[in-house]
Image (cartoon, rainbow, N blue to C red):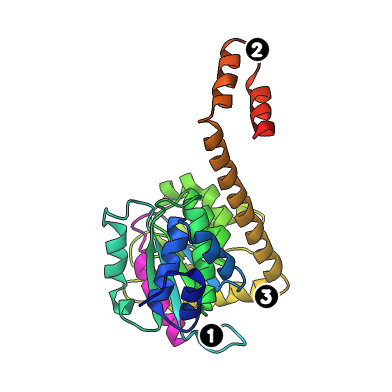
């Protein structure tokens, strides 16, 4: 029988138990009573090398992720290390866990790997977590690291704040787009430029590839990049371009390892800590807003006896 104690579960997960690993991920995802102890144990171990895959819905991210799993297992080597014996995959679904939708879609598109003992695939929703996706994912990646995974893929379902969250957790961020998406690309280019280490123009057998590449190059020309994001053309459904994408990931890793990797991880830790602090402060504010002292300050505001800034400072100082 699988225990429920995080320490015992961590020992089992380290020894290869997928059931124990799944339970630990449930703990960090739900932010329940065992979450803090699980995180404490997991953060003693470095996280895997993480490749985040994001971009607009329908861009072909799941198919591309599926292809990358195969490549990582087959080639599976960054310079100076042997291949990846195991690959961890987190498929992020921000919707209700009962809605089906993206969770089912990810499972279907990755069914070739669903029973592979060398691949662990987990669909995650943001339900109930203290800080939503932005906190659940780094914790989950740490759990994978504690379970001896050295390489992980994280796939999101769309563009927006989520892609920035993924960039915070990832070492290499891949943004997937399609030919002819000039308007949507223009609308979101600030976010894309901010997070992308690699752009993939997927479905490159469609018209408009040259124009899309030109638009991306022009966007990049406007920015200032210590690392200029690479652009790869791919057809994920056939596997075309997957090797090129893998080579781009390896090239970006080499760039980081040239004296930048530690600072990159340190910046990621800063962002994680900031998110935890923000989540805890939001929780504290929520608690304050239901107390008698809060209502007294509201009365004082209505009476013109104070202002919101003094009222907030007083509530915080008295809490």
Q: Which mark is residue 59?
A: none
- The tag earlier along the polypeptide, 2 or 3, is 3
Disc sitting over residue 257 in the figure: 3
Q: Disc number at residue 305?
A: 2
* x 65%, y 66%: residue: 265
Classify residue 252 as left or right of residue 152: right
CB atoms of marks 2 and 3 within 8 Å: no
Camera sees residue 278:
yes
Q: Are marks 1 and 2 in contact (CB under 8 Å)?
A: no
Q: Are marks 3 and 1 in contact (CB under 8 Å)?
A: no
Looking at the rendering, the stretch of residues picked out in magenta corresponds to: 56-77
Mark nearest the camera among 1 and 2 is 2
Label 2 to label 3: alpha-carbon separation: 58 Å
How far apart are labels 3 and 1 at the CA level? 15 Å
Q: Which one is nearer the viewer's eye here, 107 or 125?
A: 125
Residue 281 x/y as whole percent: 59, 42
Q: Quadrant of the N terminus?
A: bottom left
Image quadrant of residue 115?
bottom left
Give the residue displayed 29% in from the left and 68% down from the top: 107
In the foreground, 266 or 273: 273
> Which label number is shown at residue 77?
1
């Amino acid at each position: 029988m699988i225990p429920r104690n995080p320490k015992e579960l961590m020992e089992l997960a380290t020894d290869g138990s997928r059931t124990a690993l799944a339970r630990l991920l449930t703990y960090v995802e739900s932010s329940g009573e065992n979450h803090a102890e699980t995180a404490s144990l997991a953060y003693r171990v470095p996280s895997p090398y993480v490749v985040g895959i994001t971009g607009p819905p329908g861009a072909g991210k799941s198919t591309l992720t599926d292809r990358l799993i195969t490549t990582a297992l087959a080639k599976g080597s960054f310079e100076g290390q042997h291949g990846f014996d195991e690959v961890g995959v987190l498929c992020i679904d921000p919707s209700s866990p009962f809605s089906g939708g993206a969770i089912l879609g990810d499972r279907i598109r990755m069914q070739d790997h669903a029973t592979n003992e060398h691949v662990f695939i987990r669909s995650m929703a943001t339900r109930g977590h203290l800080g939503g996706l932005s906190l659940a994912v780094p914790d989950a990646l740490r759990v994978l690291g504690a379970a001896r995974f050295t390489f992980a893929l994280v796939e999101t379902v769309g563009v927006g704040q989520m892609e920035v969250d993924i960039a915070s957790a990832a070492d290499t961020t891949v943004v997937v787009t399609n030919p002819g998406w000039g308007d949507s690309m223009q609308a979101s280019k600030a976010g894309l430029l901010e997070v992308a280490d690699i752009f993939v123009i997927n479905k490159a057998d469609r018209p408009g590839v040259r124009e899309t590449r030109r638009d991306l190059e022009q966007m990049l020309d406007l920015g200032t990049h210590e690392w200029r994001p690479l652009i790869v053309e791919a057809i994920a459904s056939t596997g075309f371009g997957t090797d090129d994408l893998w080579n781009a990931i390896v090239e970006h890793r080499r760039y980081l390892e040239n004296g930048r990797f530690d600072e990159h991880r340190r910046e990621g830790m800063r962002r994680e800590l900031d998110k935890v602090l923000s989540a805890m402060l939001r929780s504290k504010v929520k608690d304050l807003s239901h107390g008698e002292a809060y209502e007294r300050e509201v009365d004082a505001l209505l009476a013109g006896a104070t202002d919101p800034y003094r009222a907030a400072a007083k509530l915080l100082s008295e809490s």
